[in-house]
Image: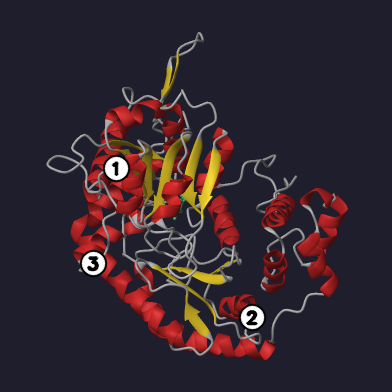
Amino acid sequence: MTDAPGTTALPAEGVPALRVLDEIRALRAADRPTHGGRLFAYVYDPGVAGLDELAQAAYAESAHVNGLDPTAFPSLLAMENALVGAAARLLGGGPGTNAPEVVGNVTSGGTESLILAVKAARDARPDVAEPRIVVPVSGHAAFAKAAHYLRVTLDPVDVDPVTLRPGVADVAAAIRPETVLVAASAPSYAHGVVDPVAEIAAVAGAAGVRCHVDACFGGWALPWLRRLGAPVPAFDFAVDGVTSISVDLHKYAYAPKGVSVLLHRNPALRAPQYFAYADWPGYTMINPVIASTRSGGPIAAAYATLRHLGEDGYLRLAEQTRAAVTGLADAVRAVDGLRLMAEPQSTVVCFTTDGDPDLDLFVLVDELTARGWHTQPQLRYAGLPASVHLTVTASVAPRVAEFGPALIEAVAAARAAGPVALPPELLALAGSLSPAALTPELIAGLAAGLGLGAGPAPDRMAAVNTLLDAAPVALRERLLAEFVGLLQRPTF
Ligand SMILES: *Cc1c(COP(=O)(O)O)cnc(C)c1O
């Protein structure tokens, strides 16, 4: 055996099981920490002892079951229907509610849920040759991906620079005869603010247009926060005019990755989501979601997670999360030179600098990383400053007391280090270059100059972020696609 782990997946001679697992653990050591409450994006950690083991066992039990055919594997159908029922009930649907006929499906994630919401809306209107969707710019990028994949035109609606919410009159004005869907977020991922869902759904309804509430992030958090007394505005099926809602179970339901739920107010609204095909000699294909073969693993793991935690468990976790949000926001407020982008309304803390040129936000992010706090930088956009995003989960609560001092230290270190100084020619290039002018040589040169060669990303990303921040949107997209493409090369 001469192959190093992570180079080839298919050695000439099979590797013993325990050694393979050791190899994976060795590779995992380079990853950011998925547990422990110091990674504020990508992962959702409840910090509940034994929950991982339960989810893993449930996953293993159903990993080879195929969701392709619900009649062949009724176990999966039962668990999927139970998950959809739980999500529906949490979000104002089910018997005795404003949405008694609610239906839904489990998808692989929020992006798939949004693509399918757009697809259902598009295909419900075969009379519209060039369909359009209205989405606030604070809406998740997955709406743009849906529009791109489905050849639907995206009509963005600006958000107020202070409230970070779209104005209802602007949403109404963006609706055209070709509009098939209007979107709202509960809350937005970037800033964690809840859109005025009731007002948006009302203008959509008045125009006879579907209204999707993207509660991928908050759908499994806001209802518990409301039960704890937080002033959560109406955002679910209690609101007339809301036709569909997405909620990611792999976020605040704390299920392992690969599970979101897309709900429709009634079966007729869902009908155009299905793809059915009998015009070939094989089995008739009837798919409610994008994938055809689907592993039962994620569904079983989510089912086990929900059953084990129960309502009391989620309430407890929401209480811890709320305490963590309050503590983190206080820590930000206490630092001179930082300000919250918005008062935390859900489970996001988002902050920026107050404009002091000596305090570079991207350097601050690196200084926090160097101290073991992994935050998510967000580039400036349409009049909004660059910001730092913190997704807060229950596991953060025991860490909060350490965050304040670390933040103070990191801010001092960032001030001492001073802002990133890229060569002015490079910044000018980033500001003026058109994506079409990017040659492979130029990209390779830029990547090398920024330390983005093969191998793991550099510890300090401030230079990369500064360059991207200076670049217009189209160039950011192209540069990042190229940089990531450089990483995604096979090992032989
Ligand atoms: C995470 C998220 C999505 C996309 O979900 P994925 O599971 O990453 O595909 C969509 N909308 C919002 C508001 C989100 O937070």
The number of numbered discs placed on residues in the rendered structure image is 3
Residue drawn 48% across and 81% down? Answer: 339
Determine the secondary structure under disc 3: helix
376 lies left or right of 489: left
**Residue drawn at 66 percent across, 52 percent down:** 6
Q: Earlier in the sequence, mark 1 or mark 3?
A: 1
Could you classify mark 2 by the number of other residues whose Cα lies within 10 Å: few (under 14), some (14-19), or many (20 or more)?
many
Name the amino acid, label 2: Asp
Gap between marks 1 and 3 measured at Cα? 32 Å
Residue highlighted by disc 3: 316
Q: Earlier in the sequence, mark 2 or mark 1?
A: 1
In the image, the residue with mark 2 has its CB under 8 Å from the nearest atom of ligand 1: no
For residue 241, which numbered disc appears in the image?
A: 1
Report the amino acid beneath label 1: Gly
CB of mark 1 within 8 Å of CB of mark 3?
A: no
Which quarter shows the C terminus? top right
Q: Secondary structure at mark 2?
A: loop
Relative vertical location of residue 230 with respect to residue 401 in this rendering, above or below:
above
Under circle 1, the secondary element is loop
